[in-house]
Image (cartoon, helix red, strand yellow):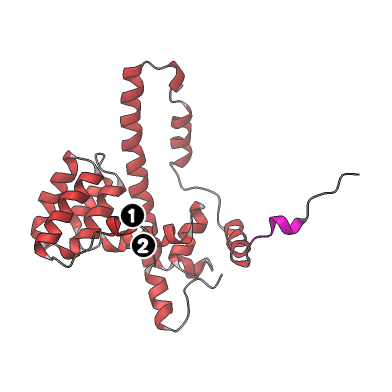
Amino acid sequence: MAVSPSTSFFDVSRAAHRRARIRASLPTVAPAGFDQINDQIDALPDPDLLCAEERAAAMRHTARLRNRIEAYLTGLAGAADTAGDSRVLGAGTTGSLVAIATGSPVAVGSGMVNTANALHDPPVVKGCLGCRQHFEAHVYQILAHAPAIDDFTSKQAAIVGLAKLTDASEVRRVLQVAAEADNPTHLDLSLISNAPNAPAPVRPGERDVGDHRNARRGRRGDPG
């Protein structure tokens, strides 16, 4: 007689159970417009039926649409943090709410909230996030190096212009050079993370605003 595997093999943490319960309680009816977007995606041509030139063009346009969706998602996270949605929905911190709603790790949700909040100050960079030419990776590199660049506000437009011309890795390299020139003590987090036996760096966005508020009250933001 076959023996069923022990259910303990599939045990998950209490925090994961809690997130699953919250996820099940979240509204499922989308605002107007989302059904139409889904229908339009379903109507896109089969990649196997396209020629090489058509696939290349489709990849480019798909990436632009992905970037606009990511920008909108970041805006949702920021608005949720400002309005205190996580308290209304009993989800702990805003980072936890974003993670639960999107099926992402909590650190990713908190990072999205942190990006949205960081974009309150540099309006030119905020506009860059939503434009078709830029991925969130570009904006992350700009925000990561901005504190070490002297008079960053006056250089925002030029930096965004740079981002329009190249990929995120080249943006990181150029901004790293500028940051080191202005502030020799500035450290490149990506280089640290690639060093042998180096501890994982705490990148911008590891905690959201709700986490910091709760830390000041002497407890973690995510009780799960």
Q: Main secondary structure of the magenta part?
A: helix
**For residue 175, above or below residue 149:** above
Question: Is there a contact, CB below 8 Å, between mark 2 and mark 1?
Answer: yes
**Left or right, residue 68 beside residue 165:** right
Disc 2 residue type (three-letter): Ala
- Which residues lie in the magenta part? 7-12
Residue at 36% in and 33% down = 62
Q: Quadrant of residue 81?
A: bottom left
**Which residue is at 22% across, 50% downward?**
172
* Residue at point 71%, 56% (across, down): 9
Whether residue 171 appears in magenta in the rendering, the answer is: no
Q: Residues within 10 Å of mark 2 (few under 14, many from 20)?
A: few
Q: Position of residue 75 (x, y in %)?
A: 34, 55
Residue 194 marker: 1
Mark 2 lies on residue? 198
Residue 101 position, x and y percent, is 50, 55
Q: Quadrant of the N terminus?
A: top right
Left or right, 43 with reference to 142: right
Determine whether 170 is above or below 112 in the image: above
Badge 1: how crowded within 10 Å, few (<14), some, or many (20+)? few
Residue that lies at the very extreme toward the front in this rendered image: 196
| 38, above or below 170, in the image | above
As helix, strand or loop, the secondary structure at mark 1 comes to helix
